[in-house]
Amino acid sequence: MLKWGLMGAVACAAMTVSGAEPAQPAAEAVATPSAVAAAMKGVQVLSGEVNPNAQVYFYLYSAGWCGPCCAAMPGIVELYKEMKADGRAEIILISYDKSPEGAKKYAESYQAEMPTVHAGDKGLLSLPSFAHARGIPAVAIIRADGEVIGYGAPSRIAKWKELVK
């Protein structure tokens, strides 16, 4: 719902006094899926659902056989719960496990509800600003329109609130 504020109230009152009809607030804009969410339609999501309205996406490159990845997952899962409740940011787990089944098991072993995909999925190549990681764990930070904000260690996910409006 739009908030008119003081100026809107004054304008409305002035129009009413003059006999003109007050302007009606515009209808709520229908949210359109982000470029990232739209491209995810071509990717096999093994578990979880992609938030189409997120402002920022984190491509989390990880795997169940990677010790540092596994050490980071409990904290990432807790951050994801905050993100999911807030709705302005999303993590997409891109797993480098040997198979899609292994990727799904990896996410399930941490009760990770984030959308999970296998790194071998050719559909990933259509994601805005997607590139395979040179090493894991790693994270790419992408705006909804596909612009890269940054790359780095998964610890950067903890600053997600600074990246959303």
Image (cartoon, rainbow, N blue to C red):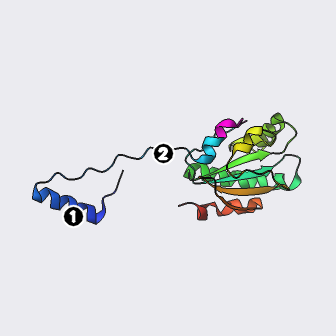
Q: Quadrant of residue 139?
A: bottom right
Residue where numbered disc 2 is placed = 31
Q: Is residue 61 visible?
A: yes
Q: Position of residue 125 (x, y in %)?
A: 74, 44
Q: Position of residue 114 (x, y in %)?
A: 68, 44
At horizontal 57% and vertical 50% (from top left) the residue drawn is 54
Q: Quick check: 56 above or below 107?
A: below
Q: Quadrant of residue 113?
A: top right
Q: Indicate left or right for 146 with 153 as reference.
A: left
Task: Please give the label number shown on residue 64.
Answer: none
Q: Position of residue 66 (x, y in %)?
A: 88, 51
Q: Nearer the viewer, residue 81 or 11?
A: 11
Kind of residue sitting beneath label 2: Ala
Alpha carbon distance from label 2 to label 1:
30 Å
Q: Indicate left or right for 12 with 108 as reference.
A: left
Q: Quadrant of residue 30?
A: top left
Kind of residue sitting beneath label 1: Val
Secondary structure found at label 1? helix
**Label 2 close to label 1 by CB (< 8 Å):** no
Region in magenta: 40-46
Residue density around tag 1, few if under 14, some if 14–19, many if 20 or more, within 10 Å: few
How many marks are shown on the rendered structure?
2
Residue where numbered disc 1 is placed = 10
Q: Position of residue 44 (x, y in %)?
A: 72, 35
Magenta region includes residue 118: no
Q: Nearer the viewer, residue 137 or 129?
A: 129
